[in-house]
Amino acid sequence: MAPNSTDTSLRPVVTRFAPSPTGFMHIGGVRTALFAYLYAKRHRGTFILRIEDTDKEREVPGSIAHIQESLAWLGITPDFGPDTPGPWGSNIQSERLSIYKRYAEELIAKGLAYPDPYTAAEVEAFRAQATAEKRPFLIRNHRPATFEVWDGTKPLRLKVPEVKRYTWHDVVRGELTAGEEALDDVVLIKADGYPTYNFAHIVDDHEMGVTHIMRADEFISSLPKFLSIYDALGLPYPEFVTMPPILRDDRSKKLGKRDGAKDILDYRTEGYLPEAMMNFLALTGWNPGTEQELFTHDELVAAFDATKIQRAGAVVNEDKLLWMNKYHLGKKDEAFKHEYVKNALPEALRSLPTCTEEILTALTPVVLERIHTKVEISDAAREGEYDFAFITPEYDTALLQWKKDPSVLEALPRLKRVFEILSAANVDFSNAEALKELLMPYAEEVGKGEVLWPLRVALSGRAQSPDPFTIMTIIGGGETLKRLSNACGKIQGDAS
C-alpha cells in the first residue's frame, strides 16, 4: 500500500464518472462509466456523475444533457448527478469554485502554492532553453525564491512538497513507479479563477468520498503529479483502476472521434438495445473468467470484478455487438418486437393501407429471423424484401419457371392445381403447418421444386423470399388466391 494510502476496503465503495462537456459521448467514455457503475453496484456502493466543466473554452452547449441522456439510455443510473446534489453540494465543478479556493488557500498557508510570476512568453523562453540544452522542461527549476501574495489574477502553482520517486498500486496494472522527472509545479487554479483538472478532481474525489477512480490509461503518466497534490493536501490516496484502451480495428492506436468512434446515441438510432450495448461494453476489456458472454444487467452487477479488467487494449468487434443485439432482441416480448419492426420500416410502407397491425404481427417473426438491427430492417425494406407483405407483386413471367423445366408453361397446371387445393379446403391461413400438410402431398408427387418454386414466386415476386407457407400466413387466404390467379393469367397471357 502506498505511504499515504488508507485501506479503502474499510470504507463504503464510492465511484464516479467525471466527463467534460466537450461534445458527444463515445464508447470509450461510456465504458469507463459502466465499469465504475458496475463496481459500485457490485459492492452496494455509490456511483456519482460529476461534470468537469472548468475548461470553458472547450465546452459544447448541450453536452451535459447529452451525457445524462446517454447514461440513462444504457441504464447507468447515478446516485448523485448534475440534477441531484450530494451532501457535499453540487456535482458540477463550475458551481464549486469556492471549495477549490478554500483548498488552494490551505496550500498557500502551508507554503506549498505560489502565484506564477511569469508571462506566457517567459515560460516559452524557459521551454526553448531546455529544448536547446536537451533536458526536460520543468517549471520548478524556475521557481521564484520569494512568493507574492496571490490575489487571483495570476495562475496559482503547486510547490511540489517533495521531489522524489513515486510508487503506487493500480488495481489493473499492479505496482507502478515514476521518477522525479514526472514531478513539476503544476497550475492549480488558472488566471480566470477556474481550477485545473489536476487540482479540481482531487479535491472533489476527497470531498465526495470517492474510493476507486476508474479512468483511461493516458492518465498513468500524470499520476506522480496527482500524488504530489494529495501529499501537499495531506489527503489519502484512493484506489486507482486503469482502463485498457479501446483500439482501432488495425490495433495501431486508440479509437477516437477522428477514427470513426460514434456518438453512443447513434447506436440507439440504429436499433441497438441498451441491454446489448451494456453487455457488449462490459466485455470490451473485461473478462468474467468464465465462458459466459451473454449477460443481463443484474448478472453483470453480480459478476463484475475489477481485478479481471484486462491490461491489453480491446478492439470493438461489431460482429459480436450485432450477435448480442439479436440475442437480447429475441428476449423481448412480442409487443416490443412488433413495435421494433414497425418503427424500422420506411414511411412509404407504413403509410400503405395494407400495412395493418395484423399483417405486421405476422411479418415480425419473419423479419427478425435474420436481422440484427433496425438499420438492417430499413435497408432490406428499401431493397423490396418485405414488399410482398403489403403489395401485390409485379415480376417477369419467366421468373416462375423452375430451373429443370424447358419453359414457364410447365408451371401453369401446377399453380392451377395449388389454387384448386387451397380453394376447396377449409384451411386456416394463419397456420403454416396446416398449409404445408395440405400442399406437400401434391408437391412430393410432382416434385417439390416444380411446385414450390413457382408458388413462392407467385406470392412474393422474388427469387429469394420466405417460404410460400410463411408468406401465405402473412398475406392471408384472399390475397394468396388472388396472386395465384394473377400468376396463371400472366403465363397464359404471355403464351397467347
Image (tube, helix red, strand yellow):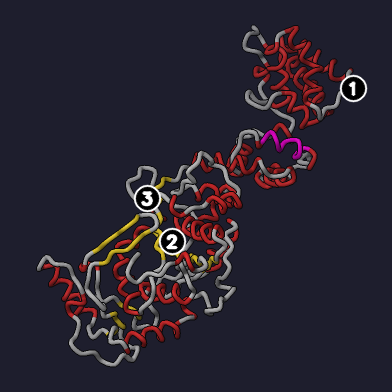
Q: Mark 2 points at which residue?
A: 214
| Disc 2 element | strand
Where residue 341 sits: x, y (%)?
68, 43
| First reached walking from the N terminus: tag 1 or tag 3 | 3
Q: Name the residue under label 1.
A: 426
The answer to whether residue 467 is left or right of residue 71 is right
User: Label 1 to label 3, Cα distance in Å?
Assistant: 66 Å
Range drawn in magenta: 359-367
The N terminus - image quarter? bottom left
Where residue 305 sits: x, y (%)?
48, 53
Q: Which quarter of the picture shows residue 400?
A: top right
Above or below for 379 versus 44: above
Question: In this view of the protein, can residue 39 be seen by the observer?
Answer: yes
Is residue 363 located in the magenta-colored stretch of the structure? yes
Q: Name the residue under label 3.
A: 311
Is residue 142 located in the magenta-colored stretch of the structure? no
Q: Do the residues labelled 2 and 1 touch (CB within 8 Å)?
A: no
| First reached walking from the N terminus: tag 2 or tag 1 | 2
The answer to whether residue 338 is left or right of residue 148 is right
Nearest the camera: 411 or 434?
434
User: Label 2 to label 1, Cα distance in Å?
Assistant: 66 Å
Q: Which quarter of the picture shows residue 438?
A: top right
